[in-house]
Amino acid sequence: MQLDLIILLLSFILAVAAWIGHEVMLARSLVKIAAHVEQTKSQAMGLSDSESNPRTSVLVCVRDGQDCIGNLLEALKHQEFNGDWEVVVIDDDSSDETWRMLEDFQQNENAPFDLKIFQLRNTRPGKKEALQSAIDHAKGRTLVLTDADCLPSDFSWLERMVVPLEAGKDLVLGVSLPRLGRAKGVLGALQVWDALRIVRSYVGWLGKGHPYMGVGRNLALRAKIHPGFESHHDLASGDDDLAIQQLLSSGSCATVALLDRASQMDSELPKTARGWVRQKQRHWTTASRYTAGDRIRLILPQLLTVLCLVSGCLALVAGFRCGVLHIALWIVVAGMGSAWLVAVLTFRSIAKACQTPDQWLHFGWIQPIGACWVWMMAITMVFVPSKQKW
């Protein structure tokens, strides 16, 4: 075989091995964190029972949420939380019946929490002004953040999120998965794959000592350490990941991730491809503000994917020219098949660690489509920026 073919095949094999190593590393890190959480769960709950809970504020920002805010407040009524707590809701310039519904709930419902509602008008794009207002009005020593279109997975959700803060942690990264609704068919499977891929990334890198983000739909922290949004107020997005990165940059923020079902917040995703792409575009606008190290860690698997494809295709062409196409084809097919099999198996372990529905365990097969989708999103971000601001 010619030297160029040998170099191409070696490059392909090394790229596949590096990609597999990356996948296995993050999956093992997430599974290890999940196992640790299960081992310490009973001990943490015992601490909660033996000490009085601090006053806690649940923060919710909503715009045009008449179809969902009532469901969230009703679900929060059933939280089994042994402590003084409040729910602070900011109506961010809604044009529907959201404010009226909030007033009716405040006046007519008998809830175990103190409901505080505030209304904002003519705010900037994004929800940072609304969230800052909620933080300013909150009286709790701990803050628990979620969204109006989410529902807690269990009656003990709030307690599970607050207990680590009582035990000395500063920041709790929770999980939010699209269990309330998603698209049908392959698009829905892709949405599940993407949601678990994101969990694997931020929880896995936390386990490796490089935390970089969380999700604002399920997040808890000590009120006194929230950094605010001044450093990135010009962006519509970034109220969760950029704020967390600013908080973590101090180097003294004790952070923990919770993966068990009781600590999760269930969410809903757009039912159409266009709606979902617009949502993802809005989320991705913060990527340019990530640190160089975080960007390298996040883009590395995508670059390895491209290197696998390019070197594999070039190796096939070189093998054809050298008359040994069958050898090159076997190596390339074996490498791609091994990578796909690892993706399927690691996805199953991640889905199992997050205690997802059984059918979700099988969505790892969509990895090739998912890789193409990630690159499509990256290209779309360059040429078709999102116009959706909230």
Image (cartoon, grey):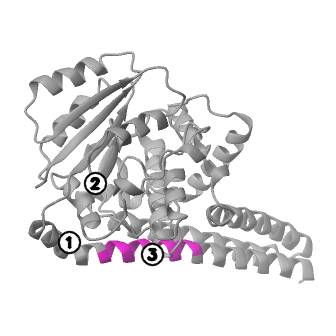
Mark 1–mark 2 distance (CA, rounded to whole Å)? 19 Å
Point out the residue furthest to the left here.
Answer: 110
- Classify mark 3: helix, strand or loop: helix
Residue 308, position in %: x, y? 72, 68
In the image, what residue occupies the spot 54% across and 29% down?
125
* Residue at the disc numbered 1: 44
Dot 3 or dot 1: first in sequence order is 3
Callout 3 touching callout 1 (CB < 8 Å): no
Q: Which mark is residue 29?
A: 3
Q: Is residue 338 visible in this depiction of the protein?
A: no
In the image, what residue occupies the spot 63% across and 56% down?
290
- Classify mark 2: helix, strand or loop: loop
Question: What is the count of numbered marks?
Answer: 3
* Residue at the disc numbered 2: 141
**Residue 31 lies in the magenta stretch:** yes
Which quarter of the picture shows residue 292? bottom right
Mark 3–mark 1 distance (CA, rounded to whole Å)? 21 Å
Residue 141, position in %: x, y? 28, 54
Which quarter of the picture shows residue 106? top left
- Classify mark 1: helix, strand or loop: helix
Is residue 363 toward the left or the right of residue 387 in the image? left
Is residue 148 toward the left or the right of residue 299 in the image? left
Region of the chain picked out in magenta, as a range: 22-36
Mark 3–mark 2 distance (CA, rounded to whole Å)? 31 Å
Is residue 328 toward the left or the right of residue 213 in the image? right
Residue 244, position in %: x, y? 49, 56
Question: Which quarter shows the N terminus?
Answer: bottom right
Mark 2, other Cα within 10 Å: few <14 / some 14–19 / many ≥20: some
Three-letter amino acid code at disc 3? Ser
